[in-house]
Amino acid sequence: MKKIIKITALLLSVVLVIASFASCSTGGKEEESSTEEASSSSASGDMTDITVCLDWTPNTNHTGLFVAKEKGYYADEGLNVTIVQPPENGSVQACAAGQAQFAVDAQDTLAAAFTSDTPLGVEAVAALIQHNTSGIISKKGEGMDRPKGLEGKTYLTWNSPIELAMMQNVVESDGGDWSKVKVVPNDVTAEAEDVEANPDHAIWVFYGWGKINGDIKHIDTDFFYFKDINPVFDYYTPVLIGNTEYMEKNPEITKKFLAATEKGYEYAISDPDSAAEILVKADTTHSLDGSEELVKASQEYLAKEYVSDAKSWGYIDPARWNAFYSWLYTEGLIEKELPAGTGFTDEYLPQK
């Protein structure tokens, strides 16, 4: 998974998005270049065109979006929704530039969007998964079922400042010495297979994909969640974000989009097997080909995680959201303190 990128890179990349984004759209259709054009354009006369940019190739984090499209929930709301892959510079920049009205990202990687002198015009509007399901996978029995056990072992890193600070925090919180952990670049795509072949390796994965992939391949692994070591790390990943200007100008369309998306995720919760089949069928990247068993197992796991203990789908707890950004500032990982409530809104979610 991609991690935090530098603020300067974020801002410079916005100007490149317009040129690169069209080539990433599924179906080869040229998308509208402004929020006003996007809201007024129509593929069928009275339908409103919406583009959603993913953060990665299709996976079970995204299932509700594909279900809502396949089942006609978006069409029922008068929306013609196109789901596209991110351009090279990422989904946040595409959304901020108006190339997509909505996008998928995560609270940690969004931090840079809010902390520059010219913040990007995006906000999180819904949590796609209620709790942070990421953690560390390692070969079973090698002592890395807890953070202190990484002493003398090798951690595979993306060299993100936030990532490394979190790793240091959990190791030291467990009584370990972070300086005794060997850190090497991470270029692994099959994490469970890697730790099986390299018993001293530890890798950051999301349980619903990396850990479950190992389980279905009968690879014995250990795993611990970051949120179980430090509750501050129970931040929101992934989230659905929206272009702030677009949403302010089109509040009813935004509400309709989220209402239909909620129905898609509710379907995935109630019938994970069918939802998994919809996702695989809809994957035009073919990255899921041959992974049907993994998709179904992952879907079973996430069916319990999309809402979990929240009062409703999409809910973002202000205390949890704010606590993570406060920690980033205290640790010097962002350049300025963010006021409480920065970067998310619940005003467009369906009211219960």
Image (cartoon, helix red, strand yellow):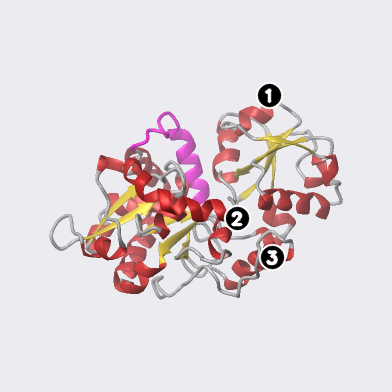
Q: CA distance from mark 1 to mark 3?
A: 38 Å
Residue at figure coordinates x 73%, y 49% from the top left: 167
On the image, numbered disc 2 is attached to which residue?
Answer: 132
Camera-side residue of 39 and 116? 116
Above/below status of 86 relative to 253:
above
Q: Are marks 1 and 3 in contact (CB under 8 Å)?
A: no
Residue at figure coordinates x 38%, y 47% from the top left: 275
Q: What residue type is disc 2 on?
A: Asn
- Snapshot quadrant of residue 152: top right
Ranked by sequence position, the earlier of labels 2 and 3 is: 2
Residue 301 falls within the magenta-colored stretch: yes
Camera-side residue of 330 and 7? 7
Label 1 sits on a secondary structure element that is helix
Outermost residue, top side:
197
On the image, numbered disc 1 is attached to which residue?
Answer: 197
Which stretch did the figure color magenta?
Answer: 284-303
Query: Circle 3: is it few (<14), some (14-19), or many (20+) Cα within 10 Å?
Result: some
Q: What residue type is disc 1 on?
A: Ala
- Snapshot quadrant of residue 49: bottom left
Instruction: Indicate left or right for 76 with 86 as reference.
Output: left
Label 2 sits on a secondary structure element that is loop
Ranked by sequence position, the earlier of labels 2 and 1 is: 2
Q: CA distance from mark 2 to mark 1?
A: 27 Å
Whether residue 303 is visible here, answered yes or no, is no
On the image, numbered disc 3 is attached to which residue?
Answer: 329
